Amino acid sequence: MTQLQVLKVFVAAADRGELWIHTPAVELPLAGHPLVGTSWLLRREGVEVPVLRPPAGEVPTWVDGDDTWIRARPEWAPEFDMHQLAAPTDVDAHPGAGRDKVLQVWSWGDETAGDVRVRVFPTRMGIDEDEATGSAAIRLGALLRRPLTIHQGVASRIVVEPAPDGTVAIGGRVEFVERADYSDA
């Protein structure tokens, strides 16, 4: 059985959106999907905040239809060793990364439509492979400077919208799976 490698978000002040993000190995100043998920969860719990405040800075958040969004500066995201591959099948067949890597491999699925297949191996952060990596999506959106739909993991879809001011918005649908108690963790 594979052990689930979890990013944890610690909310210090829900009404102000103050929080910290940790992987199994490091604290992150910004992580896209934990912020999208935290924004969604706070709303679900009746706390609507227009801005989240991770260590990196103020991150606006909003809902549009079924998608929850954040907007951040790409330089706040962790750096990824990014490699473009020839085809989505090459991305799917990639063997992964060594122990001290933060690797993103990607390929156009349909360049005209902005569809991209991605896998991320943040092993230096204590995670073998991430199902959805919003911070890598922010970095890729800044690099390519165009709207994208990123398909990552088994079923993750990350919508990417770069802005003229250099920030990048990412969004997607969040699904509640289960409530876990980490009080003893």
Image (spheres, rainbow, N blue to C red):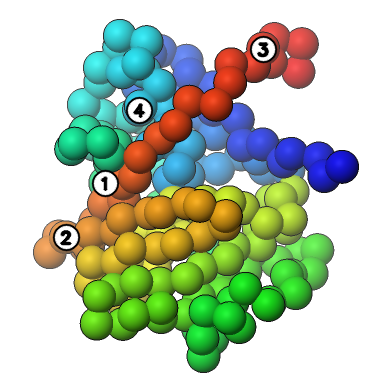
Q: Is there any visible trace of residue 67 in the rendered image?
A: yes
- The residue at which mark 1 appears reads as 71
Quadrant that contains the N terminus: top right
Q: Nearer the viewer, residue 22 or 91?
A: 91
- First in residue order: circle 2 vs circle 4: 4
Where is residue 53 drawn, in percent x and y? 36, 30
Q: Is residue 55 visible?
A: no
Quarter where residue 112 is shown: bottom left
Mark 1 residue type: Arg
Point out the frontmost of discs 2 and 4.
4
Mark 1 surroundings within 10 Å by alpha-carbon count, few (fewer than 14), some (14 through 19), many (20 or more)? many
Q: Nearer the viewer, residue 174 or 75?
A: 174
**Side of 48 relative to 92 (left or right):** left
Above or below, 157 against 185 in this view is below
Of badges 2 and 3, the one in the foreground is 3
The amino acid at mark 3 is Asp
Instruction: State which tag comes first along the sequence, 2 or 3.
Output: 2
Q: Give the residue number, with chain letter if any, for mark 2.
A: 163
Q: Secondary structure at mark 2?
A: loop
Circles 2, 3 touching at the beta carbon (< 8 Å)? no
Label 3 crowding class (10 Å Cα cut-off): few <14, some 14-19, many 20+?
Answer: few
Label 2 packing within 10 angstroms: few (<14), some (14-19), many (20+): some
Q: Position of residue 85 (x, y in %)?
A: 54, 86
Mark earlier in primary sequence (1, 3):
1
Which badge, 2 or 1, comes first in the chain's sequence? Answer: 1
Residue at the (21%, 26%) spot, across then down: 50
Image quarter (top left, top right, bottom left or bottom right) of the C terminus: top right
Label 1 to label 4, Cα distance in Å? 12 Å
